[in-house]
Amino acid sequence: MPLSWPYLIILVMDVKISDPENWVEQYADFLYAYTLKFIPNSDTAQNLVQETFLAALRSRDSFRGRSAEKTWLAGILRHKIMDYFKRRYREIPAGDFAAASDESMEQFFDRATGHLKKTPLEWQLNAAALLDKKEFWEAFHHCLGRLSEKTAAVFSLRELQGCKTPEICKLLGISKTHLWVMLHRARLQLRECLERNWFGKDAS
Amino acid sequence: MLRKILMRLPVISCEKASRLMSARMDRPLAPWEHVELVLHLAVCDGCREISRQIGFLRLLLGAWRHDLLEESWQGGPYLSREAKDQMKLELTR
């Protein structure tokens, strides 16, 4: 067969797909770390990683090297995570939960005046320094784990996944208002926890 | 002088301001909501710092995700050797 260039491209693309036997060594840690940011439970995270590899194996033929292998696997994992959330947190839209939402904000604001109860400390904001800091992410992981499961899931979908409001609402069957209340709560609680466990300490 | 003027205006509470500063991360604010928030932040150091901090967290998490997808990413947490061996077993069945 003549070595025409379209043939060569296909040949090269095939060579780029690595052997599934190598997938675990190459990608398991990455997929695991990724999952833990959404689901703080190590057993569940491990299962989802396993399921991702199996799904990837089954659909291997449809992967034609259009994107990086890592991105492809991450995409499969993302679907698994969304499905997990859907199964676990989807609910019939509830009625008015304003009372419940006001209650949880009481920890931050004076009931009568609406003033901030506690003045925040000034944080050193250095994203570049924090990205590689293992200890910071451990503190973050701890703080994420302190949120209620559903609140943490919603926050992760929004901030880590970048999902938009309608997407999350559709996935979990909640109203926009409900979502925004949860995100508000998550942001304040996370902020406070991180202040106590990281930014407020003598850490650099 | 400007601060004195601002402090005489009816300013929303910290609680409402915090609701708005969070909301604007998910949807556009209506013009009056925007004005209410800006006025409050102009006179409230605490809320201004909080706004800065939650904005920073968004930035940081976005950067983390981008970082993670890089081919060179080396961070943890890591799976145990046993867990990995188990996965390899499952894959090659």
Image (tube, rainbow, N blue to C red):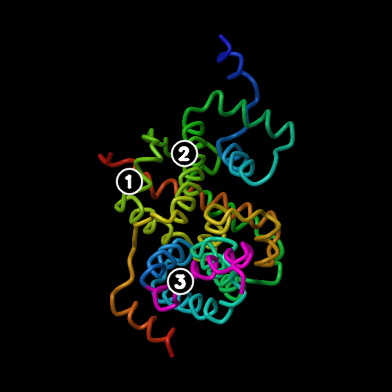
Q: Is the Cβ of the residue at disc 3 closer than 8 Å to that at disc 2? A: no
What subunit carries mark 3? Answer: A
- The amino acid on which the numbered mark 2 sits, given as a three-letter code, is Gln
- Please give left or right for residue B92 compared with residue A76 in the image: left
- For the residue pair A21 and A2, the one nearer the viewer reads as A2
Distance from Cα at disc 2 to Cα at disc 1: 13 Å
Is A204 situated above or below A31? above
Split into 4 quadrants, where in the image is the C terminus of chain A?
top left
- Start-end of magenta stretch: A1-24
Mark 2 — residue? B53
The disc label shown at residue A18, or none:
3
Q: Do the residues at discs 3 and 2 belong to one chain?
A: no
* Residue at image point 53% right, 76% down: A56
Q: Position of residue B74 (x, y in %)?
A: 34, 57
Is A101 situated above or below A22? above
Residue occupying the far top of the picture: B1
Badge 2: residue crowd in 10 Å (few <14, some 14–19, many ≥20):
many
Element at label 1: helix
Split into 4 quadrants, where in the image is the N terminus of chain A?
bottom right
* Residue at image point 32% right, 46% down: A198
* Residue at image point 32% right, 49% down: A133
Looking at the image, is mark 3 or mark 2 nearer the viewer?
3
Q: Looking at the image, tell me whether mark 1 or mark 3 is earlier in sequence order.
A: 3
Mark 1 — residue? A198
- Please give left or right for residue A134 compared with residue A167 in the image: left
Badge 3: residue crowd in 10 Å (few <14, some 14–19, many ≥20):
few
- The amino acid on which the numbered mark 1 sits, given as a three-letter code, is Trp
Q: Position of residue A36 (x, y in %)?
A: 43, 65
Q: Position of residue A72 (x, y in %)?
A: 55, 66
- Please give left or right for residue A171 compared with residue A57 in the image: right
Distance from Cα at disc 1 to Cα at disc 3: 40 Å
